[in-house]
Image: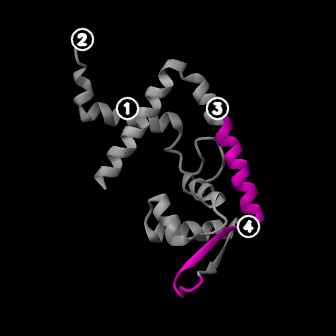
Amino acid sequence: MSRDHRADDPAVLQEALGSFVRAFGLHQPETTPCGQPISVSEAHALGELAQEREMRQVELTRRLRLQKSTVSRLVGQMSARGWLERAPAPNDGRGVVLRLTPSGQRAAQNLAQARRERFSRLLGSIPVHERAVVLHALDVMVEALDEEQ
């Protein structure tokens, strides 16, 4: 079997990822790929905070893989929307603990439902025999990106 040499061309990878970003809607900064009218960063923050009762802001920064100043702005925006509250971290005068408000919990639930529906449709569009290959390729990409850092 002959090898596809295009797979060794960084430009081909760049084009493929660019096409994926556009098709999935990741280039639209004010809307999530599942069509919700919030930023992708806010959506990821809501998802992380919904998994925990409370979380230190430094942990949210680590999980989102964003700069500290970016997360500070994000937390400010989400607080202004009424989605989260900030409190001083116990035993740490500089630390901040974040908790979703009831409004934030509703926003996170709505987002999770939209995400389940979108990914269910997407999965249904991928032929059954290709699904494991797609998931494996995504895992390999994440591992490669982690190694770069």
Quarter of the image that includes the N terminus: top left
Marks 3/4 in contact by CB < 8 Å: the verdict is no
Q: At which x and y percent is residue 10?
A: 25, 35
What distance separates the C-alpha of mark 1 from that of mark 3? 23 Å
Does the magenta run of residues contain 93? Answer: yes
- For the residue labelled by badge 4, is the local secondary structure a helix, a strand or a loop? loop
The residue at 37%/32% (across/down) is 16
Q: Which residue is mark 1?
A: 16
Q: Which residue is mark 4?
A: 101
Q: At which x and y percent is residue 114?
A: 69, 42
For residue 1, which numbered disc appears in the image? 2
- What amino acid is found at the position of numbered circle 3 in the picture? Ser
Chain-order first, disc 3 or disc 2? 2
Is residue 61 toward the left or the right of residue 32 in the image? left
Q: At which x and y percent is residue 77?
A: 61, 67
What distance separates the C-alpha of mark 3 from that of mark 2? 35 Å
Q: Which residues are magenta?
A: 90-117
- Tell me if mark 3 has few (under 14), some (14-19) or many (20+) residues whose alpha carbon lies within 10 angstroms of its own: few
Chain-order first, disc 1 or disc 3? 1
Q: At which x and y percent is residue 38?
A: 63, 53
Q: Which residue is mark 3?
A: 120
- For the residue labelled by badge 3, is the local secondary structure a helix, a strand or a loop? helix
Marks 1/4 in contact by CB < 8 Å: the verdict is no
Marks 2/1 in contact by CB < 8 Å: the verdict is no
Marks 4/2 in contact by CB < 8 Å: the verdict is no
- For the residue labelled by badge 2, is the local secondary structure a helix, a strand or a loop? loop
What distance separates the C-alpha of mark 3 from that of mark 4? 28 Å
Is residue 107 toward the left or the right of residue 78 in the image? right
